[in-house]
């Protein structure tokens, strides 16, 4: 945040900014470089006229144009289920821990709240009554009378108890109603609970009309045909049963074995029963038993349990379509012939997914969000320019400091990719890498799979096996020659020499750590506070208070240290409001730098120069770390002795290198607002790091001469001359993070 002030205001501002212990205001709202994705998609529903597709996320409701699938409105709170009224005038949202909310579909205005139970619920066909369950009792709420006008209880059929055993203790679940569905006449109500029967009740008198026999199982889902002639259910044994309302005995829906298991979901307007299967969708004609099938064109799963199951069927009668949720996208199918027409991808879930699954490549201006559908974004346009399908979820992600190379754990192997392009570099098979680390150069990979192994990331060759403890964290030192492993329990740091396969050092009380060019920095809880220490140093670098609130995650669960060893982030809760917040502290001084309210997860990227967290629009946002913390960036240029204490306030800056073009050496000038370590990374045209210039601690001031500017001799980290071409350089220093381009011509 920049300001231009004069006279006494300037003096007052500088006095505050330069005062010891200055803390950035909690009211400051940082602006992200880029925000991508949306919260998790929970449910979908077409409007009755088919003009709108309502999407329900964990945070809000968003309406999409049903032809273009572009957003047209956003309102309300999130939930788990969404439903349109038959006339399309209202939208209901259900969430287990909150009352049901009914919105005006045209304006998004909240009209009514109904305190329904946590489990089952169903609207009557006219939407004036709402049935809901509390345990094994069903209540029918009349919206006009604003009262429960019927109670359904006393089913004589005994329940089937669900028995659970955990840690040697066996318990039986209480009997409860799981599903409700009204008959189209608005009187009959199907009640599904843990019984061998489905109960059919009169929703006005509260009397039980009849039972429908299931067998030695219970029902997991239920659907009623629109003409009221039959209903279907999917049982816990994987069977699909269809009953005629006038016949208590069901008919089992049989499918060809090649279709695999199927789950009855809903009837369409023509009476077809739609069933979902793994990576497939089916329509059954219950009159003649014929079935139509369509399969998805995504990356095929390697194992059956990794297959995708379409969920939340909703029908667009006007266009003859059915929409389903598939993981983090929406599939649009044609009813006629059951054919997949398109996938709608708004990157749902990216905004809610753990920020550790995202990587930034500053040298190429690319953000990559890893998942089963991995997306590559341009940090200028904010658009997805590539989507890469994987056959399974990704369990772990590790990237180099500059983000150019990424290792992924999925299935039973670790794959290494060029981050910005998706180019596959190598695969290490039969590894379940619960913990991964990749060296700064991208050449070496550490994998924990019940033992620690070191691999070449370029050719997949195993280089060493180290007898470390079970790691809670691991990282290579900047040279790539040593591996730091944080074990727990006991909480120690182990430093291993990879070539010698020898344990060089063990540091007791090892908490979160950063392997930096200046040494290993780690955090220790000691005497009711956190101490930030550097291995080999005597006194702690700084002391940081513990969070005031009790948070899950153990001793070090609430605390995070950035990879460069500059910042400590501590999760906490506001003492008054209970809102989650994160406090940021300086590693060197322990001073509070900033407090940010609300972010559930903070992950540093690109060596700590940037971070990911939840953005202002509930997406995943990328920030420059210093801008997110609102650390002041000011330089003082003396005019005379009288004004030397204040001077002229100017923004820190990186200037163009000189000469440019150059051969073989060039200088990179900069103005530094405050003393501190200066790092310059140089990238080639592919975004790979070719050289890191670690200038050490530099004094504040102007660094524009050959004696004071950074010098690059045109060689890589290995000392070899680089080829002619365009190179990008990025500087990271206190109050300064910027980049430029230069041309080497031989």
Image: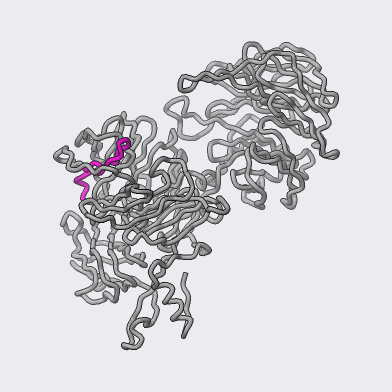
Q: Position of residue 687 (x, y in %)?
A: 32, 55
* In-front residue for pair 212/598: 598
* Relative height, residue 739 to residue 189 (above, below): below
Relative horizontal placement of residue 5, taking residue 46 as reference (left or right) = left
State the residue lying farthest toward the left: 500
Q: In the figure, residue 81 lies in which quadrant?
A: top right
**Which region is colored magenta?**
479-495
State the residue lying farthest toward the front: 527
Q: Residue at x 58, y 35 (%)?
A: 340
* In-front residue for pair 628/49: 628
Taking the image as drawn, is residue 37 in sight?
A: yes
Colour scheme in the image? one colour
* In-front residue for pair 408/154: 154
The number of callouts visible is 0
Q: Position of residue 699 (x, y in %)?
A: 26, 71
Q: Which residue is drawn at 25% across and 73% down?
A: 658
* Relative height, residue 717 to residue 746 (above, below): above
Relative horizontal placement of residue 203, taking residue 444 as reference (left or right) = right
Taking the image as drawn, is residue 418 in sight?
A: no
Q: Position of residue 244 (x, y in %)?
A: 76, 16
Q: In the figure, residue 280 lies in which quadrant?
A: top right
Relative horizontal placement of residue 386, taking residue 488 as reference (left or right) = right
Q: Quadrant of the C terminus?
A: bottom left
* Relative height, residue 343 to residue 540 (above, below): above
Q: Give yes or no for residue 507 being in the magenta stretch.
A: no
Q: Position of residue 567 (x, y in %)?
A: 36, 57
Q: Give yes or no for residue 482 being in the magenta stretch.
A: yes
């Amino acid at each position: 945040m920049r300001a231009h002030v004069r006279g006494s205001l300037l003096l007052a501002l500088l006095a505050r900014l330069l005062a010891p212990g200055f803390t950035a205001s909690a009211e400051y709202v940082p602006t992200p470089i880029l925000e991508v994705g949306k919260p998790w998609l929970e449910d979908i529903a077409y409007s009755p006229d088919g003009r709108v597709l309502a999407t329900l996320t964990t945070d809000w409701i968003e309406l999409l144009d049903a032809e273009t699938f572009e957003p047209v409105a956003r309102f309300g709170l999130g939930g788990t289920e969404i439903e349109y009224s038959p006339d399309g005038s209202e939208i209901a949202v259900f969430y287990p821990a909150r009352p049901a909310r009914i919105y005006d579909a045209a304006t998004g205005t909240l009209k009514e709240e109904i305190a329904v139970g946590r489990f089952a619920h169903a609207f009557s066909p006219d939407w004036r009554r709402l049935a809901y369950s509390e345990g094994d009792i069903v209540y029918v709420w009349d919206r006009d009378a604003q009262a429960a006008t019927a109670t359904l209880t006393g089913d004589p059929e005994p329940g089937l108890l669900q028995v659970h055993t955990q840690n040697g203790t066996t318990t039986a679940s209480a009997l409860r109603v799981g599903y409700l569905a009204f008959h189209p006449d608005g009187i009959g109500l199907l009640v599904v609970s843990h019984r061998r029967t489905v109960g059919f009740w009169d929703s006005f008198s509260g009397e039980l009309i009849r039972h429908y026999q299931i067998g030695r199982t219970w029902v997991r889902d239920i659907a009623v045909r629109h003409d009221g002639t039959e209903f279907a259910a999917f049982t816990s044994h994987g069977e699909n049963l269809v009953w005629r309302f006038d016949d208590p005995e069901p008919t089992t829906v049989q499918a060809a074995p090649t279709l695999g298991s199927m789950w009855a979901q809903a009837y369409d307007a023509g009476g077809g029963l739609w069933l979902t299967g793994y990576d497939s969708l089916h329509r059954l004609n219950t009159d003649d038993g014929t079935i139509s099938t369509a399969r998805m064109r995504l990356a095929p799963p390697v194992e059956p349990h990794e297959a995708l199951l379409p969920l939340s069927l909703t029908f667009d009668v006007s266009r003859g379509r059915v929409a389903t949720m598939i993981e983090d996208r929406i599939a649009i199918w044609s009813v006629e012939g059951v054919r997949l027409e398109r996938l709608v991808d708004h990157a749902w879930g990216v905004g809610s997914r753990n920020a550790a699954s995202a990587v930034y490549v500053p040298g190429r201006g690319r953000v990559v969000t890893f998942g089963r559908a991995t997306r590559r974004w341009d940090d200028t346009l904010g658009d997805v320019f590539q989507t890469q399908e994987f056959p399974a979820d990704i369990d772990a992600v590790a990237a180099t400091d500059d983000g150019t190379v990424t290792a992924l754990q999925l299935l039973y192997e670790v794959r290494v990719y060029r981050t910005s392009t998706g180019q596959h570099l190598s695969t290490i098979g039969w590894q379940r890498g619960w913990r991964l680390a990749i060296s700064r150069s991208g050449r070496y990979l550490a994998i924990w799979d019940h033992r620690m192994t070191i691999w070449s990331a370029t050719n997949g060759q195993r280089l060493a096996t180290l007898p470390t403890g079970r790691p809670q964290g691991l990282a290579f030192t900047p040279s790539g020659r040593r591996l730091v492993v944080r074990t727990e329990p006991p909480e120690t740091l182990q430093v291993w020499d990879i070539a010698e396969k020898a344990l060089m050092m063990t540091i007791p009380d090892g908490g979160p750590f950063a392997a930096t060019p200046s040494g290993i920095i780690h955090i220790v809880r000691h005497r009711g506070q956190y101490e930030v220490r550097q291995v080999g140093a005597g006194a702690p670098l700084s002391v940081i208070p513990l969070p005031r609130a009790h948070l899950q995650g153990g001793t070090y669960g609430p605390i995070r240290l950035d990879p460069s060893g500059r910042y400590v982030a501590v999760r906490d809760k506001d003492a008054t409001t209970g809102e989650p917040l994160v406090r940021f502290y300086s590693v060197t001084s322990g001073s509070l730098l900033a407090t940010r309210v609300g972010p559930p997860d903070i992950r540093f990227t690109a060596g700590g120069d940037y971070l990911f967290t939840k953005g202002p629009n509930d997406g995943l946002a990328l920030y420059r770390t210093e801008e997110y913390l609102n650390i002041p960036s000011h330089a003082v240029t003396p005019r005379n002795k009288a004004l030397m204490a204040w001077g002229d306030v100017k923004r820190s800056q990186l200037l163009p290198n000189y000469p440019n073009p150059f051969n073989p050496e060039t200088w990179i000038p900069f103005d530094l607002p405050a003393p501190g370590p200066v790092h310059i990374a140089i990238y080639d045209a592919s975004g790979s790091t070719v050289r890191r210039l670690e200038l050490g601690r530099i004094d504040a001031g102007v660094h524009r001469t050959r004696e004071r500017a950074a010098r690059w001799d045109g060689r890589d980290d290995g000392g070899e001359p680089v080829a002619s071409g365009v190179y990008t350089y990025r500087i990271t220093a206190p109050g300064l993070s910027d980049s430029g381009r230069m041309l080497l011509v031989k």
